[in-house]
Image (cartoon, helix red, strand yellow):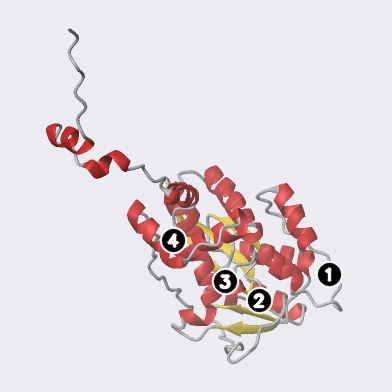
Amino acid sequence: MAEEQVKLSERVRCSLLSVNRSGLYYKPVANKDLELELLILDIWLLHNNKGWRSIQADLREYHQLVVNHKKVRRLMHKLGIHGILPRKNTSKSDKAHYKYPYGLKNLNVNKSNMVWCSDISYIKLGGGFVYVVAIVDIYSRAILDYEISNTLEVDFCVRCLERCIKRYGKPKIFNTDQGVQYTSNAWVNLLTQHEIMISMDGKGRWADNVWIERIWRTIKYECLYLNGVETLIDLKQKLKEYIGYYNNRRLHSSLGYKQPFVTYKAGISSNQNQQFDIWCVYDKAAFNELKDAA
C-alpha cells in the first residue's frame, strides 16, 4: 500500500526550515537611484572638480533630468565624491610705474565688451615654470584669448591684447592688477592708443579683479592639477581643449548656468555690429549649435 503524502501547512514548513514566512512574499525592489548614481559618477569622473551645484546643472541641461539638490548631495556623499576647493593666490605689484585708479566701483557691467580684464598665472611643468596671460570679458566670463611664455616680459601680454582687439573690437574699460607688465609703457600705450580707459586693482585688493582670479582657479583645478602637465606641448593641448570646453559647454553659475560664449554673443550691443568667433573649439558641432541658439 502506497504511503500517503502528508501535506504540511506553510507555517509548519517555515518553522521546520527556520525561515520567516514574510520572506516568501518578498519581491526585490529595483534600485531607482542606481542609474542616477552612475550618471553622477560619470559626470564627476569627467570633471572631478565639480560640486553638487554644477552636477545638478549638468543633469538638467545635458540629460534633461530635474533632480533635487539634496538628492544630488546625498548620492555624492554615498559615492564618496565631492568638489575640489582651491586656495587663494595673490599678485605682486611694481613700485616703479604709475598706478591707475580702480574704475569699476559700483559699475553695472551689463553688456559684452564693456569691461575686459587680464591676469598672469604661472604653471609648473616637469622642467620648470611657464607663464600664461589670459584676457576675459567680465560680463560674459568668456576667455577671449591667452598666450604662453617662458618669461615675464611684457611682449606676450601685448601680443595677446592686440589679437583680442583685432578679433573682437575694443572694450570701454580694461582692468588689471598692478603687475609690472600692466604698468609698462608698452601695455599702457596700446590701451591709450585705442582710447581704452585703464583701471587697476587697489594694492593688495585681489577681489577687485576677482573674475579672472576665479577663472584661473577653475582652469587649474578642473584641468591642469587633475590631469597633470609635464611638457609645454601637453600644456598647449590641454589649455586649448579646456578653454574651448569652458567657453562653449561649461555652464557658469554666475550666468544663470549658461555658457560664456552664448552670453558673450547675446551681450553684444546691436549698434556695435562686431564680427567675432571663439577660436578654441571643444566640439565643432556643439559650437555651431550654440552659435545658432544664441
CA distance for labels 2 and 3:
24 Å
Measured as percent of width and height from the top left, residue 17 is found at: 15, 32
Q: Residue at x 61, y 89 (%)?
A: 103
Visible residue check, residue 128 = no
Q: Is residue 96 left or right of residue 1?
A: right
Look at the image and tell me in which quarter the N terminus lies: top left
Q: Is residue 239 left or right of residue 115?
A: left
* Amino acid at pointer 4: Val
Measured as percent of width and height from the top left, residue 166 is found at: 78, 65
Q: Residue 274 bears which disc, if any?
A: 1
Q: Residue at x 35, y 52 (%)?
A: 79
Contact between marks 2 and 4 (CB within 8 A): the answer is: no
* Amino acid at pointer 2: Tyr
Q: Residue 244 bears which disc, if any?
A: none
Which residue is denoted by mark 3 in the rendering?
181
Q: Is residue 135 above or below residue 6?
A: below
